[in-house]
Amino acid sequence: MCKLLIAMLSFIFVMNNAQSADIIIRPGDVLQIEIPGEIDFEKTFQVKRDGTLKLPEVGNVSIVGKTLKQVNEDLAKLLGEEYRAINNFKVYLVERRVPIQVLGFVEIPGMIDLPQDGNIQMALQKAGGAVAGAQLDRIQLNRQGKVTIFDYKKYLDTGDFSILPTIEPLDVIFVPASPLIGNVQMDFDAATLSASGDGSEIGTAIKVFGEVLKPGVFSFKKGNTVVDMLMRAGGVTRYAGVEHIRVINNGTPELFDLKTYLDTGDTSHMPKITPGSTLFIPIQEEEVKSGLRTIYVMGEVIKPGAYEAPIGTKFFDILANAGGPTRFAESRKIRILRTTGKVDAFDLQAYTEGLTQVAIPTVSPGDAIFVPEKTDMNEKSWLKITPDRAIRVIGAVKKPGRYEWGDEMSFLDILAHAGGPTQDADMSQVRVIKKDESKRMEPFDLDSFITEGGSFSLLPRVGAGDTIIISERPRDVIDNKAGWLRQSQESSIYVFGQVGQPGRYAFNNKLHILDILSAADGPNQYADIHNIKITHRNGFHSRVSSLDLGLYFETGDETLLPRVKSGDTIYIPERNKPWIDNKKEKTVRIIGAVEKPGRYKFSSDMTILDILAESGGPTETAYLERIMVVNISRNQSEENISHVFDLEKFIEYPDFTKLPMVRVGDTIFVPDVSQSNWNVFMANVKDMLSIVSLVAIVGGL
């Protein structure tokens, strides 16, 4: 089937080209070589771009520029050396193709292959079309170094095929970039690019700028007028001075009055537009407006100015034409300045609230309406607020200052008006200094009110003349001494003794004792964490509590941690202090024949053996059979009780259940051997013998 189709195409092409033997072979031509019986020549062969033809058993053969007849002869001679049956050898031109290159601002630049009747539009279509930013009126056709420039945009506008040059094999089509996109590769909006003009030729482009909606550079088109160029630029803005449009042609400036032209339609005063012209539309200059029917609106309105007021114009008509009051307007104190010199006041806010006694003022030509500024909205207007209407907010707020006070406002209103507390504000100690010095207010815990909620009746009552002070927390807990003067005693807690950073710290009642110990860098290596003392000073009477922090770390019992408040004092003592520092109610005394008699700390999990070991143990002369333990009674009605403990017997027969009970406050006495009964008796015997001997001697004398 394929062979039949190729034969039919070859026959048709030969019949349509009676002089096919004289056809010059070009790159891209498709040839059919007929050698009966050879399978390798059943397909077609296309001439490459370098003018060669690749044949089986022969390789590349240059045939470009030769006639079809010459190609038949040359290939018959060349193939005759490799193949025998070439009596019916024939070369046919099956199809003519046009291989070209499309480069530049197209979607798919590169080599493309077109049919013999291909044109520029088909070439651009095969290359994916031009991309945004391509300059269609300056496309180049390069044929063996000779460049032809044509206007593809004009072809698209008119459909005139004569504008497009014919293409031949090996031509190069180049689509340049528009000079409007600059020299930096970047993404851009084509609509925005085109909005700034379509001019590409600097010498002939028309420049339009000033008070137009789309200033830019536009291409020159014969017959365009000033109005046409203004329309291409989107028209003039509301601020354009249309009476003074400037047009520069060939270095000569001319004035054009667009308003007069629109009123009269007279084109005789309209400047001509030539290649390279420049149009400038200036901003409208302010003019003083006055007249017999003018009413003036000043102050805080959207569009202050002079307005024409025909007979019957109402106050609200003028105010509405001026755009109405702004958000900064003091609508309670609008003033109407009469031509007679009289000044009338009008409370617009009271009128909008439906108060019947407020009447709408009348206005007449020559009057002036003045809408003043809200004094509390402008920091520079402090002098306008009298002291009896002002309240001061100072300290750690975002906008400290002096604000106008209204009776309908509350404490939170004025605090919000000042921007609210900063992130460094100590909201637990908000102070209010009343205008009346006899009324002293305690600090208010705003932080607790915000987090826990409460009735608004609990908020401090403030009024005109008062001062609200928001204190600032110290920013560095390590070096906090610089903030002591700004930090009140009521909001402080004191940490002394063996901690990393003893000192005075900001504290609120939501913090924990572990929080303040952490802020002080915690106990150091010399700290006695079993005997921490807390002085609670915030009540009617100071009291002291103890904390065994070591026991808390061992058990995790939260009930061991006391609650601390602002004003309290925490003291962490040093370990291994002299025994005199230990209170008798917390110690056990050991005296007598021990190495180190004295007072020792005692806990419920200790025994008499622990105390003896703590004191260095009994001496060599200790009387171990008669160790005395004196237990102090816990009630005044009971007497103290003593027990005898035989340490030697315990060592020989150890039974821990028979150890005497020892509690804090008790006393242990270890006697000496000289105090035993036998030694006392022998001492008495020696004394008696000495007396008898003395009597005998005296008698002898």
Image (tube, rainbow, N blue to C red):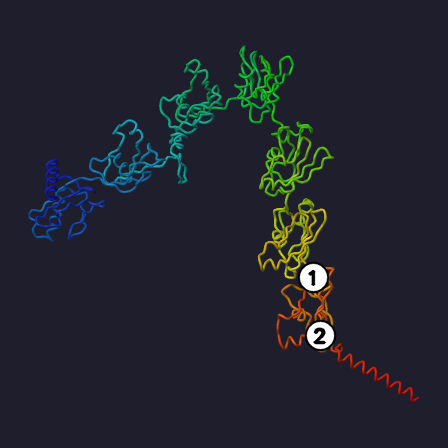
Task: Give me the C-alpha separation between circle 2 and circle 1.
Answer: 26 Å
Residue 162 as seen in the image, left or right of residue 511: left
SS label for mark 1 = helix
Residue 116 as seen in the image, left or right of residue 376: left
SS label for mark 2 = helix
Q: Earlier in the sequence, mark 2 or mark 1?
A: 1
Position in image of residue 527 (x %, y %): 65, 60
User: Circle 1 sits on which residue?
Assistant: 586
> 49 or 289: which is nearer to us?
289
Residue under the point 42% across and 14% down: 266
Position in image of residue 575 (x %, y %): 67, 62
User: Dividing the image into 4 quarters, which one contains the C terminus?
Assistant: bottom right
User: Quarter of the image holding residue 612?
Assistant: bottom right
> 400 or 587: which is nearer to us?
587
User: Quarter of the image holding residue 402?
Assistant: top right
User: Dividing the image into 4 quarters, which one contains the N terminus?
Assistant: top left
Position in image of residue 552 (x %, y %): 60, 57
Which numbered tag is attached to residue 626?
2
Residue 239 as seen in the image, left or right of residue 623: left
